[in-house]
Image (cartoon, rainbow, N blue to C red):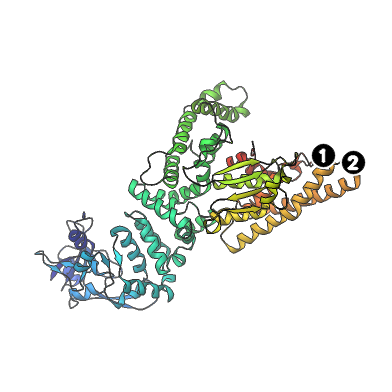
Amino acid sequence: MKIYTVGGAVRDELLGLPLADRDYVVVGATPAQMIELGFKPVGKDFPVFLHPETHEEYALARTERKTARGYRGFEFHAAPDVTLEQDLARRDLTINAIAKDETGNIIDPFGGGADLKARVLRHVGPAFVEDPVRILRVARFAARLDFAIAPETMRLMREMVANGEADALVAERVWQELSQGLMERQPSRMFRTLAECGALAVVLPELAGQFVGAAGKRTPAALDAAATRGLGLAERFALSMIRADEAAISALCERLRLPQDCRELALLAARYHADIEKSPALQADAVLWLLQNTDALRRPARFMQLLAVCTIDALDAAATSFPAAERLRTALNAAQAVDAGAVAQANREPQRIREQVARARLDAIRRALGAEQSPTKRATKKGKPMIELYTWTTPNGRKVSIMLEELGLPYRAHAINIGQGDQFKPDYVALNPNAKIPSIVDPDGPGGKPYAMMESGAILVYLAGKTGKLLPKSERGKYDALQWLMFQMGHVGPMFGQVHHFLRAAKEPVPYAIERYTKEKDRLYGVLDKRLARHEYLADEYSIADIATYPWVARYEWHKTNLTDFPNVKRWFDAISARPAVQRGMKVPA
């Protein structure tokens, strides 16, 4: 019987890295002999034993034979006649197929030592294609060691994906490798490797969009910055999903059965990162809303994790200051200092205790933050191009200012006073031939060149496409959002606008027109109410359809509508009204 140290322990020792666990292979022994020596059997699929004193793992030398698709489709053979080289031959990479005997001699039948020196990840042999987990392991080792992947190995990985082997990976093993890879020194390399071989779209389709286009530059850099700063697993996972749809995040977490802390933080980051980044421009009531909706008062430690995620996303690994996070920490400390018990005791109306506590916290936040900034004063990143917005205080104008606020894009608002005819001035007509508001000029438009746009609905679609946000990624969700956007543009806007005109602007009453358009307005409210009875938002998730419709419903008093007659619309309206980005957007232009 001979015992060899194998795998990661030998590899890391040769690389001069700290050693974690040691694994051993036993050649020339039977299970009975191991038990007789005091080893405790623990392996279910093949003979593995724990040392009676050190509790390290010792496995009998074995071979493998592929019997079915997937990483569990193997038949194992362990016997005294299985040699060390046969055992090493079943391993994934040459750098993991090195052994050391009890006297310190290195046994390296597949050239792993040379590949360590050359910093190359290379498969041991043709059996590599039999186990799809090896795709994930190569990606993880790329993140850990920053080694190049041998072209022939990458070719095999692509073949495995094309042949459907990656489809057989089970959730438990995907998350095991993903979570370990996220905690490596360069997590971005894991995702780039998976994308290069085609596995990312198969194994992690919900994540694939975060590593292409503009997000494909920002997300990898943020992940590596998080590794540099030593952030934990939940924070790193949240960064990988920060620009994904909430529905996609929930689907991935459900499918891979992720830990609750990872799920919660990822959803919070996706939902509130834009608000947090813009928080220097928030008034105290909006700051309190943000603290309440992120549950910061009850779970301050998680809120600190959220701020850490948003800090990394907004900055790079070398930056040290993120004023938004500092301001929110100050606000949270102030709110936490309020003695809710004392407020409750001093209140003679129990039903108003919650309201009074919230008011006390709001006052404390106001004092802590000092003089508040004007809502039109916005902090923008140095040198980042600003979108020029030409707008007025109308529902169509505010669609776009809300969208820009929700996306966190830097912009400059130019007031086009349509009451004074500014929209007909030659300079503006040159920008918008239809002489209507709003319009935008994006200095970083398609092809990296300035691009002017008119028509509010088209602008919303453009901005959603530019950022990959607020338009669902799924085919069904996208077309749900687009059809309800068209419903607003073709029905809600024109009909509500006619009611406004005949009730407020007509030189004399026109009963027929008032009755006709009021009835149609009420019918449209009924359509919205029926839709919102079954859906939280118009397209299941918050989207450009909601942003387009909200400013028109916000003028319910203009068209003499009692929202309590449409309870589902009112619930939707109240939820959107509470969003800080919506509050800011509704104040543009100042």
**Front-lying residue, 578 or 545:** 545
Q: Which residue is drawn at 61% across and 27% down?
A: 350
Q: Residue at x 59, y 64 (%)?
A: 475
Seen in the picture, residue 236 relative to 412 is either above or below; the reply is below
| Residue with the mark numbered 1 | 504
Residue that badge 2 annotates: 509
Mark 1 closeness class: few <14, some 14–19, many ≥20 residues within 10 Å: few
- On the question of residue 120 being in view, the answer is yes
Question: Position of 41 compared to 209: left or right?
Answer: left
- Mark 2 belongs to which amino acid? Pro
- Front position in the image: 37 or 585: 585
- Check the picture and name the quadrant holding the C terminus: top right
Residue at 63% from the left image edge and 24% from the top image edge:
349
Q: What secondary structure is marked by label 1? A: helix
Q: Where is residue 22 in the image (x, y as percent from the top left)?
A: 21, 60
From what the image shows, is residue 147 above or below residue 309?
below
Image coordinates for residue 469, horizontal then vertical, percent? 55, 53
Q: Where is residue 177 in the image (x, y as percent from the top left)?
A: 36, 61
First-in-chain label (2 vs 1): 1
